């Protein structure tokens, strides 16, 4: 089994009602080399207290509200992993996804990003059927450098459905957080493929 460390950073802003499920979905992965981080972005709803309840099983980083770009930047200040995943606190990871991601990084040395589809869940956390993007839609795959440099676009997935090479993120972060209070995933989506294979 791989010894590659994966850092999973859960971004929370007033998502206390979802945070336990999100953290538990990471702690219950079948891959053992995981650093679990919660970056609280100025919550006022008890999110910090929820995260503190996990003790030393997670790393809690609490900051004043500064937005998504700042959360990504702060994550890299504390990340120990060779692979980085950013998880929104209202999302959960399916069992086994971290092991699958690591298998891909181990098998393909030029990979800088692994992306996958998201299943839509109801309020009880049960799949409703649809996935994003839809199954009939192609995801960007392979060497996309020329395409990204020409069009800045390809079929990419939102924040919680990606895993990144930490080495690549260290090259392109910090990002200008004041410009990416929201939409910071677009910054990563457009730049990361220039460094290798998706």
Image (tube, rainbow, N blue to C red):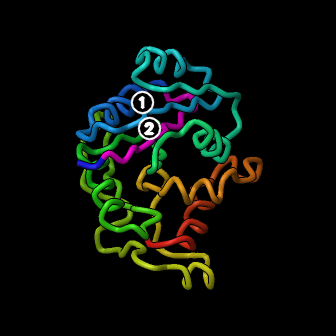
- Tell me whether circle 2 and circle 1 mark residues in contact (CB < 8 Å): yes
Label drawn at residue 90? 2
Going 48% across and 24% down the picture, which residue do you hit? 16
Within-10-Å neighbours for mark 1: few <14, some 14–19, many 20+:
some
Highlighted magenta segment, given as a residue range? 3-15
Q: Where is residue 103 in the image (x, y as percent from the top left)?
A: 28, 57
Residue 135 shown left or right of residue 70 in the figure: left
Q: Which residue is disc 1 drawn over?
A: 18
Q: Nearer the viewer, residue 156 or 114?
A: 114
Q: Distance between the residues labelled 2 and 1?
A: 5 Å
Residue 26 shown left or right of residue 46 in the figure: left
Q: Position of residue 169 (x, y in %)?
A: 58, 55
Image quadrant in which the C terminus is located: bottom left
Q: Is mark 2 on a helix, strand or loop?
A: loop
Q: What element carries label 1?
A: helix
Marked residue nearer the N-terminal end (2 or 1): 1
Residue 179, magenta (yes or no): no
Going 36% across and 60% down the picture, which residue do you hit? 105
């Amino acid at each position: 089994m791989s010894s590659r460390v994966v850092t999973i950073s859960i971004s929370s802003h007033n998502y206390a009602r979802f945070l336990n499920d999100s953290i538990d979905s990471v702690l219950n992965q079948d891959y053992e080399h995981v650093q679990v981080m919660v970056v609280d972005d100025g919550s006022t709803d008890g999110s910090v207290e929820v995260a503190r309840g996990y003790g030393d099983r997670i790393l809690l980083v609490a900051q004043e509200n500064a937005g998504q770009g700042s959360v990504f930047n702060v994550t890299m200040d504390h990340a120990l992993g060779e692979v980085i995943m950013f998880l929104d606190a209202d999302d959960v990871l399916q069992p086994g996804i971290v092991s699958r991601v690591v298998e891909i990084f181990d098998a393909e040395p030029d990979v800088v990003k692994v992306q996958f589809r998201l299943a839509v869940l109801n309020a009880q956390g049960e799949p409703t059927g649809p996935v994003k993007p839809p199954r009939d839609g192609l995801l960007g795959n392979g060497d996309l450098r020329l395409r990204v440099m020409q069009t800045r676009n390809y079929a990419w997935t939102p924040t919680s459905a990606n895993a990144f090479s930490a080495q690549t993120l260290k090259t392109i972060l910090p990002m200008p957080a004041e410009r990416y209070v929201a939409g910071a995933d677009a910054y990563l989506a457009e730049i990361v493929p220039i460094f290798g294979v998706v």
